[in-house]
Image (tube, rainbow, N blue to C red):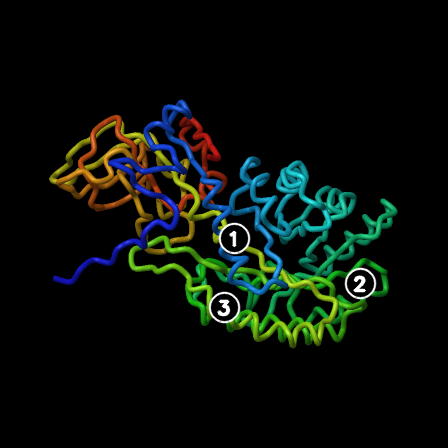
């Protein structure tokens, strides 16, 4: 009988005795400390270790920026701000959290296809680089700068004529709401030069959640080539180039962690030519889930155990209203299980096949379907791993008016 594929081992969470450890705290003790379930817990030492691993592998010249949309929890943002070189934000709310955390406005860039005039004005006033997504946005920011008497700092987000192959979410290539089509960029650059905006460079983000080094290498090479080609039309030297990210983490059975070494080797090989063509450029990668996704866990409590026509269900107080991604309703076409652990009986025997569901009156409220777990009873804790990115903030908390979860950084 063919063995079923397994989840990749957790990079950061250990089991001591019979309990999942969050940092150096047993899950059951942490739940008592938090005072309620469900909750998200993020391990600051895991985040630090991930950034340090990147620093050790990537060329020294590459700046690491945090894509705050992955997890905007203020305490987490304040922690990661001390370890990365800059931030990419996607709203005025994220801008406020980043500035409150002490991030230098000069190291913040603002992306998103639908920025309001209020958001643009706030970014200009703060001195943040705005990634222009259209000619219309360029006109609006110019008018705002004139009104405020401030020279806006801008970069052009480019929609290239290629895409990041095998990515979980394609952000470029073809018709997209993101960025300016590459063939239209030279005309926009000429317009920017005529209005004397502070042109900084380019933002070229091709896709997300990729576990194939060869695909990321190809996208990086095409990004460098495109940026060098477009720089010929730039009104001033390119001083900043965001080559995006797309680094994935293993969520599902059979997936393996991304091999960084080939990507780093390729960047090492390409950077001398990039520096020669763009002598004043700072090259940055923009990473969100790769920095924080594996550092988070979602913990909920079993409130009932029932058998229906031979199938065992663990009914918990957590679900899709707190963790939409784990339920399979945030980008999955065919639902697959996140790694799930019995947090307070992790090594218990014999194991049993169960489905972990939430309290909502919808068949979509599934956290794990037909998984093998140690025996669980009401009061036990279930942990959904890989929950540090696009968990709390990407979920419909008000659905069916259930209580809100909390977030802690440990």
Which one is nearer the viewer's eye here, 2 or 59? 59
Which one is nearer the viewer's eye here, 280 or 217? 280
Mark 3 residue element:
helix
In the rendered view, tell whether residue 250 sits above or below residue 405: below
Mark 1 residue element:
helix
Q: Earlier in the sequence, mark 1 or mark 2?
A: 1
Front of the two marks 3 and 1: 1
Residue at left offset 45%, top offset 30%: 406
Asked if the residues shown at circle 1 and circle 2 are in contact, with their CB atoms under 8 angstroms apart, the answer is no
In the rendered view, tell whether residue 254 sits above or below residue 143: below
Location of residue 20 by image quarter: top left
Which one is nearer the viewer's eye here, 252 or 156? 252
Q: Is residue 308 left or right of residue 388?
A: left
Residue 84: image x %, image y %? Answer: 60, 50
Residue receiving disc 2: 192
Q: Earlier in the sequence, mark 2 or mark 3?
A: 2
Q: CA distance from mark 1 to mark 2?
A: 38 Å
Residue receiving disc 1: 52
In the rendered view, tell whether residue 23 sits above or below residue 230: above
Which one is nearer the viewer's eye here, 305 or 136? 305
Q: Which mark is residue 263?
A: 3
Mark 2 residue element:
helix
Residue 210: image x %, image y %? Answer: 44, 62
Front of the two marks 2 and 3: 3
Location of residue 104 by image quarter: top right
């Amino acid at each position: 009988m063919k063995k079923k594929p397994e989840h990749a081992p957790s990079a950061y969470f250990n089991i001591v005795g019979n309990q999942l450890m969050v940092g150096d705290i047993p899950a059951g003790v942490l739940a008592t400390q938090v005072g309620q379930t469900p909750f998200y817990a993020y391990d600051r030492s895991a985040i630090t270790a991930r950034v340090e691993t990147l620093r050790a592998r990537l060329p020294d010249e590459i700046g690491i920026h945090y894509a705050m949309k992955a997890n905007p929890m203020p305490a987490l943002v304040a922690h990661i701000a001390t370890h990365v070189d800059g931030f990419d934000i996607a709203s005025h709310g994220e801008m406020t959290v980043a500035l409150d955390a002490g991030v230098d406005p000069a190291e913040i860039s603002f992306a998103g296809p639908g920025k309001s005039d209020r958001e643009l004005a706030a970014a200009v006033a703060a001195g943040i680089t705005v990634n222009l997504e259209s000619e219309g946005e360029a006109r609006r920011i110019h008018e705002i700068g004139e009104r405020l008497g401030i020279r806006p700092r801008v970069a052009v987000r480019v929609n290239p004529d290629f895409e990041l192959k095998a990515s979980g979410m394609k952000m470029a290539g073809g018709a997209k709401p993101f960025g300016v089509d590459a063939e239209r960029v030279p005309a926009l650059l000429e317009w920017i030069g005529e209005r004397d905006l502070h042109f900084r460079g380019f933002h070229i983000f091709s896709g997300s959640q990729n576990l194939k080094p060869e695909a990321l290498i190809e996208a990086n090479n095409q990004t460098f080539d495109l940026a060098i080609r477009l720089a010929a039309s730039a009104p001033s030297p390119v001083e900043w180039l965001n080559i995006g990210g797309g680094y994935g983490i293993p969520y599902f059975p059979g997936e393996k962690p991304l091999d960084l070494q080939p990507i780093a080797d390729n960047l090492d090989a390409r950077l001398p030519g990039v520096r020669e063509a763009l002598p004043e450029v700072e090259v940055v990668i923009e990473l969100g889930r790769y920095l924080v996704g594996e550092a988070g866990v979602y913990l909920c409590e079993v409130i009932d155990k029932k058998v229906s026509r031979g199938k065992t269900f663990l009914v918990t107080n957590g679900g899709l209203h707190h963790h939409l991604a784990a339920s399979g309703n945030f980008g999955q076409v065919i639902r697959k299980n996140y790694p799930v652990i019995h947090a307070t009986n992790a090594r218990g025997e014999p194991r049993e096949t169960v489905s972990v569901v939430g309290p909502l009156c919808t068949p979509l409220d599934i956290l794990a379907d037909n998984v093998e777990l140690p025996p669980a009873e009401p009061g036990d804790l279930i942990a959904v791993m890989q929950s540090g990115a696009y968990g709390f903030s990407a979920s419909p908390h008000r659905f069916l008016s259930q209580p809100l979860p909390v977030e802690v950084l440990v």
